[in-house]
Image (cartoon, helix red, strand yellow):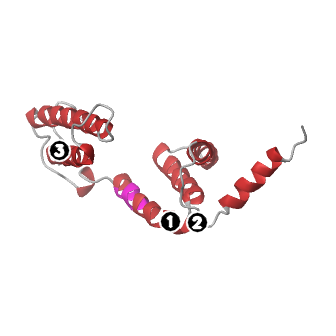
């Protein structure tokens, strides 16, 4: 475990990058609608990014005050293999989302992520992923009717079939 009284290599630069990113996102949120009203479309994004600026600023301030941990022995101290692996997986997820579709891509991404990061059994990762994707799909696609990339899964036909099961019941 790392000594929290010392700053890790790259930690100050990363926390400064979070401050800069938060400030940029605040300007993007402001461009949505400015300060028109509390109910304006940009109000919530501006509130969220303001919280991001404050918290990232506090993190940077706290991190910059810590003494450096010392010499870097290996590149894996700055960029662990798990971080590299997850970054590659997020890129693959983004690339596969449109052609393959939300359901299979998200299921595979979550399964591998939970298994790799949680160091759990593959069956546990499969179960949690299936429940998570099903829950997300039901809430966002069926209840809120948010369109998600369909890809290889014939969602429209499945939804029509499920609706026909409930619509065809005699009264």
Upstream in sequence: badge 2 or badge 1: 1
Distance Cα–Cα, label 3 vs label 2: 36 Å
Q: Nearer the viewer, residue 16 or 66?
A: 16
Q: Kindly identify which numbered label has been placed on residue 98.
A: 1
User: Quick check: 131 left or right of 90?
Assistant: right
On screen, residue 153 versus residue 82, left or right, reads right
Q: Are marks 2 and 1 in contact (CB under 8 Å)?
A: yes
Residues under numbered marks 1 and 3 in contact, where contact means CB atoms less than 8 Å apart: no
Whether residue 88 appears in magenta in the rendering, the answer is yes
Q: Please indicate whether residue 155 sits to the left or right of residue 19 in the image.
A: right
Q: Nearer the viewer, residue 11 or 39?
A: 39
Residue at x 82% of width, y 48% of height: 165
Q: CA distance from mark 1 to mark 3?
A: 30 Å
In the image, the segment drawn in magenta is 84-89
Q: Residues within 10 Å of mark 2 (few under 14, many from 20)?
A: some
**Real-space CA distance between mark 2 and mark 1, rounded to the nearest whole angstrom:** 6 Å
Going from N to C along the chain, the mark reached first, 1 or 3, is: 3
- Label 1 sits on a secondary structure element that is helix
Q: Does residue 1 appear in this view?
A: no
For label 3, the residue is: 23
Residue 134 counted in the magenta span: no
The picture places residue 70, in percent across and down from the top left corner, at 12, 44
Q: Which residue position holds label 2?
A: 151
Q: Which mark is residue 35?
A: none
Q: Residues within 10 Å of mark 1 (few under 14, many from 20)?
A: some
**Between disc 3 and disc 2, whose residue precedes?**
3
Which image quarter holds the C terminus? top right
* Residue at 58% in and 62% down: 150
Q: Quadrant of residue 94?
A: bottom left
Give the percent coordinates (x, y) of residue 132.
58, 43
């Amino acid at each position: 475990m790392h000594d929290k009284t010392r700053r890790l290599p790259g930690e100050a630069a990363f926390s400064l990058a979070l401050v800069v990113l938060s400030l940029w996102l605040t300007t993007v949120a402001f461009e949505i609608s400015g300060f028109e009203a509390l109910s304006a479309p940009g109000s919530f994004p501006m509130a969220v990014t303001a919280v991001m600026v404050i918290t990232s600023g506090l993190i940077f301030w706290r991190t910059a005050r810590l003494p450096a941990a010392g010499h870097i022995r290996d590149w894996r101290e700055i960029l662990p293999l798990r971080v590299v692996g997850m970054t590659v997986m997020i890129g693959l997820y983004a690339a596969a989302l449109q052609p393959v579709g939300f359901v299979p891509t998200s299921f595979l991404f979550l399964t591998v992520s939970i298994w790799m990061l949680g160091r759990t059994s593959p069956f546990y990762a499969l179960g949690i992923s299936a429940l998570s994707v099903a829950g997300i799909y039901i809430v966002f696609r069926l209840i809120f009717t948010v369109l998600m990339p369909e890809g290889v899964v014939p969602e429209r036909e499945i939804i029509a079939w499920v609706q026909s099961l409930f619509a065809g019941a005699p009264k």
